[in-house]
Image (cartoon, grey):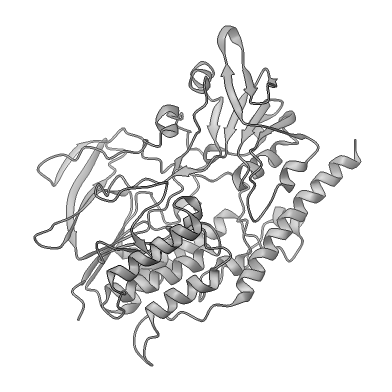
Amino acid sequence: MSQNKSVAVIGTGPAGAIAVDALVQEKSFDVVRVFERQEKAGGCWVSREHEKPVPLDIDRLAARTADGPVPVPANLPRYTPSLSQHRYFDSHVYPNLHANVDASAMSYSQEAIPEIVSEWSVKTHGPDTPFRHHTVIRQYIEDLLNRNGYQDFVEYNTTVERAEKNTQTGKWILTLRRAGKPNGFDYWWTETFDALVVASGHYAVPYVPVIKGLKEFAEKYPGSVEHTKQFRGPERYQGKRVITVGASVSAADTAASLVNHAKGPIYAVVRGKYNAYFGDEAFKHPNIERRPPISHITSDNGQRTVHFEDGTSVSDVDHIIFGTGFTWTLPFLPDIPIRNNRIPDLYLHVFHQRDPSLAFLGAVGAGLTFKVFEWQAVAAARVLAGKAQLPPLDEQRKWEAERIAKKGDGPGFLVLNPDFEEYFEQLRRLAGEPAAGAPGRRLPPFQQQWVDIFNAGHQRRIRMWKRANEARQSKL
């Protein structure tokens, strides 16, 4: 019988929400507690229209040292003045943000994303548009939590500031902080659990590359340097000279959205390595001019000049927007290192090899994400409930070593494409099928049509960019 009778879940984004459902459906745990640092469920789909952007800490973001652990006060529980350190749970969402994945491929296997479509999406993609507005996705995640009273398990506005294993008792001790605004005080306390599920996401802390003169430019011209996480639509850039940096999804979306607002051309800094799903079609717009990496920036004597590695430059730059990804941070897990922007020592991207009571959800690259989270969550719930058995440690280590040999020990390690079926079925075999009438969430066999629909949605977005490019070209 399982010794894991109490489980803590960190996060109520799409991974945390499905984790709660999977754990509760096992009917094996006396306690399931969920801690969410935001005010509502939804993870990076939570929107705050009037949120003020926090200036980028360029040195620490470039060094990947931002979002470090905070000091834990002694003698808990207690109240302390509200923490002032930025914790990077500011919103990613701009008003017209839509999911870039077909809703049927994006959804969990048993819960369809509602067929609520926006006027913009219908106008852009047709009446059968498969893309949903961000508000629909966030509500979908919250609805999963709120059914059957799951919302009662969640502590909102609560950050896990430390999670440490007591080697004598084998229990996880979580140090928790509930934000005290508007009264000016935070409440700190601890709780103890048998197991820990980390679903805190890895798209919170922006990454900004090291560029000579960038910090000075940002300081002399406040608001001039941003990350796409802070982008709130193209309107504020009307008539401004803008440079975007990055070649993947967020940079492409940002550059394309600016062409009818910012001063043309939009300068897009790319290295030639584009998103595997979307390619470079967005950057082919006649009002977008591609440039090589930035060598340095000069801002002395009123200059606002960005210099590129090929010797060219652009003057009078008003904004530089970085779509350069994120840094994975786990400030609450001091004993779990980050290596090459991934968590090492995980089996199947989920189970920590040194501690089977510790599981991570969402520790993978993009693709069929919500379904991936579901398969991971069910497998983790079964293992923690004692209904599924992990293989011997040497086999777990062999899996990681072989994947490093094949994919590398960096971002490529996390990418599931094109081996979706192999990964889904590995998790399904590990989880097993509950006996007839037995509790537990059931996982269906992998369906190739999920990938086909997934890829078709990408082609639909590519056609959107092509139409915009051709329409503009016809006017020249």
* Residue 380 x, y percent position in the rendering: 34, 70
Please tell me which residue lies in front, 97 or 361. 361
Q: Is residue 208 visible?
A: yes
- Depicted 47 relative to depicted 286: above or below: below
* Residue under the point 72% across and 42% down: 283
Quadrant of the drawing holding the C terminus: top right
Residue 244 picture quarter:
top right
Left or right, residue 289 beside residue 365? right
Q: Is residue 441 visible?
A: no
Residue drawn at the location 45% of the way across and 69% of the way down: 374
* Depicted 257 relative to depicted 310: above or below: below
Q: How many marks?
A: 0
Of residues 99 and 378, the one nearer the viewer is 378
User: Which quadrant holds the N terminus?
Assistant: bottom left
Image point 16% across, 39% down: which residue? 73
Drawn side of residue 424 relative to residue 38, left or right: right
Within the image, what quadrant is residue 113 found in?
A: bottom right
Q: Looking at the picture, how far across and down is residue 5, in whole percent?
A: 20, 72
Which x, y percent locates residue 363? Answer: 42, 57
**Rendering quarter of residue 137:** bottom right
Please name whichever residue, 70 or 167, is drawn nearer the observer in this view of the structure. Answer: 167
Relative to 78, residue 99 above or below: below
Residue displayed at 43% across by 63% down: 402
Which residue is at the far top?
301
Residue 245 location (% of width, % of height): 61, 35
Q: Of 339 and 283, which appears nearest the observer?
A: 339
